[in-house]
Image (cartoon, rainbow, N blue to C red):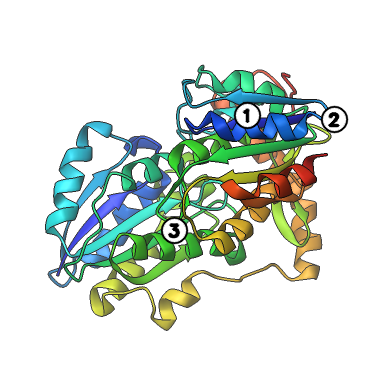
Amino acid sequence: MILIVNTTADTSVTDELKKRMSECTTDFEVIEAESLKISHCIGCNYCWLKTPGECTIKDDYEMILKKVVHADQMWVVSDTALGFIDHKGKNVYDRMIPALTMYLKFYKGQLRHVPRYQKLPDIGLIYLGSADKAFLKRWNERAALNFMRKSLGVFERDELKEAVSCMC
Amino acid sequence: MHVLIINGSPRVKKYSNTNAILEKFTEGLCENGTTFEQYEISDKNSWDQIRQSYDRNTIILVALPLYVESIPGLLIEFLETLTPKSDGSKMVFLLQGGFMEGVQLRCGEACLKIIADKLGCEYMGTLVKGDNFCIRFFEGEWRENITGAYADMGREFAAHGNFNSKACKKFTGPETIPFFVRIHVGHILNTQAKTGFEQMAAVLDCNKPLDYKPY
């Protein structure tokens, strides 16, 4: 299953994605998250040490997390700020950490948290506006490494065709 | 020299590892007359005050924990509200994380350089250091063992006005862990470290295994 979380107010992006994916055989689900209540991660570490796997913040992200941990691909659609993704997009990444455990191991020569679930999704990013694309590519690869998975790539608003080619 | 210090951790000050680090850092910073004012972005009520301080100060230090390979969402939310500067302000960062290898923090460091530029500030370097996860769980001498050396870095910053000195670079420690050491550390992670994490969980009244799968 492909999960697409749109953290922007621009639903024309997800409309186009749906249209382009209509010929795909893969299941996909789009969540329009801009209007949802999604807090930032507060760094309490309770998801690792007090309520393993569950975020202590009970907001609309819980429903998203339940889908993330069983998805094959996770795509985040985000606005940009200061050359990076904006806080709404980043919050969706930061809140994924309950999918990992407190336990550690070496993976590709570096320490990583052991994933809580057998197979977490690969991660792709679609961004609106201007950002440092080379950095975003580097960053998304590192972010996917947390799941011991790969980056599906980083795509601009006018590269949805290319993004969909990575989904189908 | 007067420094605006912004603690960019979303965690409340009382439990903030970044704040514990800043307590030691500012001890060294102030020894020869440097002054500072510090604010916490975890306290949203203070954001107006931080913005005013950002506007009037020209030396800005942002201390932060690494969150998913870059800066925490809450810190981005705050920084989005700032007006880019054109008064020759300088920006430095103190980036800390849990993993011990320096390489883990380099992507985050690159992000900070971009952000300083976008805010119209001259980038004066980032002090990079991992292995800080346990600070919150330690008190007294144990905590001092982790945070104590940051006082030296406070002195370095007071002397140079940046984090580019050899001492600051060395402070990061090893970029990666050598293969043979990894074998040894890997064994510890599967034994003593697991027990240690479970003890931390017990302190927090956790009643499930740490690898529990709720969904």
User: Foreground: B186 or B2?
Assistant: B2
Residue A116 can be seen, yes or no = no
Query: How far apart are labels 3 and 2 at the CA level?
Result: 41 Å
Q: Residues within 10 Å of mark 3 (few under 14, many from 20)?
A: many
Q: Chain of mark 3?
A: B
Residue A129 x %, y %: 47, 49
Query: How far apart are labels 1 and 2 at the CA level?
Result: 17 Å
For image coordinates 78% across by 28% down, the residue present is A22
Q: Quadrant of the N terminus of chain A?
A: top right
Q: Which residue is mark 2?
A: A26
Q: Amino acid at mark 3?
A: Leu
Front label number (3 vs 2): 2
Q: Amino acid at mark 1?
A: Asp
| Residue that extends furthest to the bottom in the rendered view of this protein | B166
Using the rendered image, report if marks 1 and 2 lie on a common chain. Answer: yes
**Image disc number at residue A15:** 1
Q: Sequence-wise, which precedes: disc 1 or disc 2?
A: 1
Element type at marker 3? strand
Element type at marker 2? loop
Quadrant for residue B126, please give it: bottom left
**Image disc number at residue B95:** 3
Q: Chain of mark 2?
A: A
Query: How far apart are labels 1 and 3 at the CA level?
Result: 39 Å
Q: Residues within 10 Å of mark 1 (few under 14, many from 20)?
A: few
Element type at marker 1? helix
Q: Amino acid at mark 2?
A: Thr
Q: Residues within 10 Å of mark 2 (few under 14, many from 20)?
A: few
